[in-house]
Image (spheres, grey):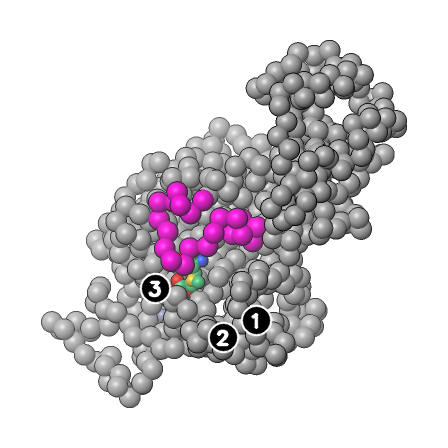
Amino acid sequence: MKFLTTNFLKCSVKGCDNSNLNFPLRYVRENCQLEQDESIEFNPEFLLRIIDRVDWQAVVSVASDLGNTELPPNKPEFEENLTDEDMVILRDLHTLLIQTNIVEGQMQCKNCEHIYYIKNSIPNLLLPPHLA
Amino acid sequence: MARKRYLLFMVQVHLNFRLAELESLADLHGVDVDFSSYSVDSPFMIVTLENDKQASDWIRRSVLTRAIYEYWGEGNTYESLHKSVQAHPEFEQYKSANERKSFKFEFEKFGGNAKQDISTRVTTIESFQYLELKGPIKMKNPDEVFTVIEEYKAISENIGGEVPEKIYFGRLIQLSDRARGALEKYDLKKRPYKGTTSFEAELSLVSANIAQVKPAHIMYDPFVGTGSFLVAGGHYGALVLGSDIDGRMIRGKGQQTIKANFKYYKESIQFLDVMTMDFTHNALRKDFVIDTILCDPPYGIRESIKVLGAKDPERFAGKEDVEINGQKAYLLRDYIPTKKPYSLDSLLDDLLDYASQRLPINGRLAFWMPTANDENVATIIPLHSNLELKYNCVQDFNKWSRRLLVYINRGHEFNGPNNSGLSRTGNFRDRYFSGFN
Ligand SMILES: C[S@@+](CC[C@H](N)C(=O)[O-])C[C@H]1O[C@@H](n2cnc3c(N)ncnc32)[C@H](O)[C@@H]1O
Ligand SMILES: [Zn+2]
């Protein structure tokens, strides 16, 4: 599962929708096995669109869960014509959002504390009957 | 600016889908097309467009056409064709625009089986000498391809005609996705990971076109299975995301995975992720905008319709307290939650509702729905008050059919009809297995 996908996933327990703690899920560095997939090429145009859709606070929070505390507190903004400096930032974000995979790991809802697993790079968001 | 005439050459297959594809692609690219001369019985249509770019934008992605040409003329015989070309109001202008270009001639035909030998072709090409083309002939990557299209009237279903009824002539503007080999590329036979639920290449690509999947936009398939629609969406440049309640489907077998398919097609960049998830217990955050939803929901035939929860809640009462080695059993990595049956009608209600919440205004939801053909009752199409039902394209099999339903999110003001909660699809599964008798 790409780092980017952590930005889309909330807790699937319906009751947690009333809480603002159900997104993003919490990741524990020690439980997560990360892998870089360098085969995916860098495409600034794509990345800009993705960044547009991303909840930046959640990016910062999950990155810090996973040990990266270097991200700026506000979403970087880019002009029409990308400068060299912009490109550096975009490359970093490509490495983080697209190339970083959580291969094995756990995600926990900060509201109900349910634990979800990531196995073989695939997150599993199914629920036991008492939470469904 | 004066509009120019173009000749569209289509294929005579999936006729219930063809106009929907052409309209959707025209709309997607902001190309204004007058379809009043469109006929399902003909593979040809002459349209006027502003310029060549519009023509190629419109047809580049198309699956149910072959190509679009700048229209130079037509006739019932070669003699009348040549007259028509020379009488074209832009003839002099077309001639001088192409005078120095490298070129070749191509021959296409429809409905005929007459095989032309080289010498007939050479004679035909020579009969166009009044075009005064002075550029070099290049068989590979010429600047321009001049195309002669012969239309035959077939003698019977299997026997083609011998003498063309009509001949068109034009300059190639754009080959369709089909003519550039998309169907061969995405042929299921060659796909590394596929399964019994995989959807064939041709109609999955057509579905993605009618759904107006857009480059660098998000497409989601909530019943992703082996990922056929993700492949189609990725081909048109979307960033694709899928989920399925059955983890085995999306995991694949060994090296054969959905991700591996994208690698095989050299489109890895399009693939975001697939996750194990019950659509009705959706974990995609509510404010995440999904541009297009394209899917094939479970019919209950090759795969059951299930959602999370206990079929017999009493049996599961108190199970949440079960512990294994001091850990709650339901929090263990290998815990497998129980599922219960659900109806297709309710699932489709949920799907429409979800689309109305997640799609942007004018975003499209497209999905396939099966129906039995022998019922005397009219098929009821699910409707939601925020969604405009734009297309209902039927693919007929013998005793049953399936249809691609396409909706556009129009928002609250739309106030359309709503039939959620209604039993619509009957018991398709039982009827299927009893042979629709
Ligand atoms: C017709 S198949 C789709 C096949 C897919 N288009 C492919 O290319 O393989 C329907 C899928 O829906 C899944 N499904 C059934 N109930 C579901 C639910 N409640 N949530 C998510 N997926 C479900 C099934 O596991 C099955 O893979
Ligand atoms: Zn929760």
Residue B128 on image: x %, y %: 76, 19
Q: Chain of mark 1?
A: B
Between the residue at mark 1 and the residue at mark 2, the CA separation in whole angstroms equals 8 Å
Q: Which mark is residue B436?
A: 2
When the figure is inspected, residue B316 is found, relative to residue B349, above or below; the finding is below
Q: Which amino acid type is marked by label 1?
A: Asn
Q: Which amino acid type is marked by label 3?
A: Asp
Residue B106 on image: x %, y %: 65, 26
Q: Which mark is residue B373?
A: 1
Tag 1 secondary structure: loop
Between the residue at mark 3 and the residue at mark 2, the CA separation in whole angstroms equals 28 Å
Q: Residue at x 55, y 35 (%)?
A: B180
When the figure is inspected, residue B335 is found, relative to residue B269, above or below; the finding is below
Residues in magenta, as a range: B187-207
- Say if residue B300 shows up in the picture: yes
Q: Residues within 10 Å of mark 1 (few under 14, many from 20)?
A: some
When the figure is inspected, residue B383 is found, relative to residue B213, above or below; the finding is below
Q: Is mark 2 within 8 Å of ligand 1?
A: no
Q: Residues within 10 Å of mark 3 (few under 14, many from 20)?
A: some
* Residue under disc 1 on the same chain as residue under disc 2: yes
Q: Chain of mark 2?
A: B
Q: Residue at x 49, y 75 (%)?
A: B436
Q: Which mark is residue B246?
A: 3
Q: Is mark 3 within 8 Å of ligand 1?
A: yes
Q: How many marks?
A: 3
Which label's residue is closer to the chain start, 3 or 2?
Answer: 3
Q: Are marks 1 and 2 in contact (CB under 8 Å)?
A: yes
Q: Chain of mark 3?
A: B
Between the residue at mark 3 and the residue at mark 1, the CA separation in whole angstroms equals 30 Å
Q: Which amino acid type is marked by label 2?
A: Phe
Of residues B1 and B304, the one nearer the viewer is B304
